Amino acid sequence: MDIGNNERRMLRAMLSDPSKEWALEELLSETGWDDQVHVAGSGAALEKVGLVSVTEHRGAVVSLGEEGERASKDGLLEARIWDWLVSQKPEDRTMSALSSALERHEAGPGVGLLKALGVTLEAGTLVTDDESHISSTIENRSAFINYLSKSPKEQSELDEEMVSHFSSRKGLIVLEERVSRNWVLTKKGKSTNVSKLEDVEMIGELTPELLQSEAWRDAEFKPFDVNAPTPTPSGGRPHPMIALIEMIRSIFLEMGFSEIEGDFIQSAGWNMDALFIPQSHPARTMQDTFYLSEPAQVDVDDKYLNLWSKVHEHGHDTGSKGWGLDFDKEESKKSLLRTHTTVNTVRHIAENPDEPCRVFGIGRVFRQESIDRTHLPEFYQIEGIIHEPEANLPMLISTLRTFYSKMGFPDVRVRPAYFPYTEPSVEVDVLWKGEWLELGGSGIFRPEVTEPLGTEWPVCAWGLGLERLAMLILELDDIRELYQPDLERLGRMPIL
């Protein structure tokens, strides 16, 4: 029989019960193999010669994510807030009391969850008209999380509404697509004579030593298909992302900019406080930021801690009223993985407050994002500033138009936007295949940012997403394709 020894072994195993539909685990046990690759390869070969048929079953398995594991132990956020709420007198259900009862970063998101269930905020007090409905909904959500905590479950077994709800929340559940295969003998396979399926010594390579001996005369040779397609050799080339980065770098250098770099590990002070992001901002929570335990803190010059404290609390001498909140200097010293490359540009201004400059940087940043076709927890950002006495908004818009034109997108528009550290702020869109797509944000740094750094000159600033730009230029639908070790797919991407 013109099949290999692995195929013979798998066929022998299946003939022990010819009518059975064999699962992977059963075949591994029967054949003695410990690698499913043997089953998959042998099954494909047997299917090709008509001895076996293969069926595939696709489905999704649902398990708890990191936040889900925490919720199964400590309770869902909305459940903990609701338990606190019903234990209070109506007049004591205030936001200030709730903020004191919870972790600093939990009150805002938690109240948002309760509002979706029908709780309203009236004059600073949380009010609801239907406590039984809210209690029932929260109990069902908690029961769902506890059910998943025992073991992962097939999605088809679960309540679709619950799966949909928790899929929209970061880190609570994980959906993993799975494909299972079963193998069954065909009529031809069942009629195979087991006695003819003994392993045989097969020669797969002709060597000079073999040909010089007589051993080849009675040997059995592995089949060789001279018509089978051969791999096409290809030369080396830069990875598409590296090529795109070099392309962007050369454009900014041509435009007269200088490149700057910075460390991945930064203090919360330089990463956020310097940019006038309030310490109560959701972006500072563990939901969006990777805080580090080693080192737990980064040294920050007291000069900047004192300046940021005054600016945040009452605006200092910037003309602003600040945020009106107490500033925690220990919070500023916490170490984290930078969430944007803007930290490089503000530090550059602080080190060179009296020197005009036009600088840019292209670097990796880190945020706790749910992985999907357009989001990754680690991605690149294109950052730049123009720091000089006459910097203005038309100069900023002209720079961005020139950059995107050189990248192949001549149609660029800007729209008013809001960012905590720029005013005015604009979002940048490009026209692609008849649609306007947002690629980044920009604006003029606020005085609360620049003056503590030692300058009163205007600063034009922008932060642009590199991966989204890569999706357009390389015509990708899923950004994960760029980071998968699929050389064939990468090789088909355009050469930049």
Image: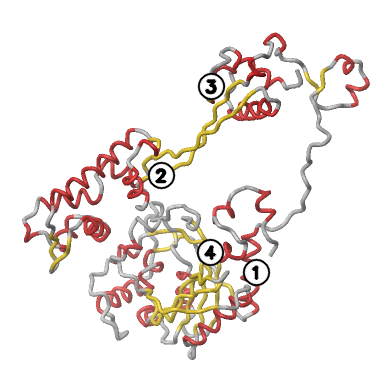
Residue 289: % across, % down:
39, 58
Mark number for residue 21? 3
Q: Are discs 2 and 4 less than 8 Å apart at CB?
A: no
Q: How is the image coloured?
A: secondary structure
Cα gap from disc 4 to disc 3, whole angstroms? 46 Å
Residue 491: % across, % down:
69, 53
At label 4, the amino acid type is Arg
* Left or right placement of residue 479 versus residue 305 in this view: right
Mark number for residue 247? 1
Circle 1 sits in a helix, a strand or a loop, which is it?
A: helix
- Of 80 and 364, nearer the camera is 80
At label 3, the amino acid type is Glu
Circle 4 sits in a helix, a strand or a loop, which is it?
A: helix
Cα gap from disc 3 to disc 2, whole angstroms? 30 Å
Q: Which residue is mark 4?
A: 468
Q: Earlier in the sequence, mark 1 or mark 2?
A: 2
Cα gap from disc 2 to disc 4, whole angstroms? 24 Å
Circle 2 sits in a helix, a strand or a loop, which is it?
A: strand
Q: Earlier in the sequence, mark 4 or mark 3?
A: 3
Image vertical order of residue 408 relative to residue 471, above or below: below
Mark number for residue 174? 2
At label 1, the amino acid type is Met
Image vertical order of residue 397 relative to residue 88, above or below: below
Question: Which mark is nearer the camera, 3 or 2?
Answer: 3
Residue 334, quarter of picture: bottom left
Question: Which mark is nearer the camera, 1 or 2?
Answer: 2
Dot 1, crowdedness within 10 Å: few (<14), some or many (≥20)?
some
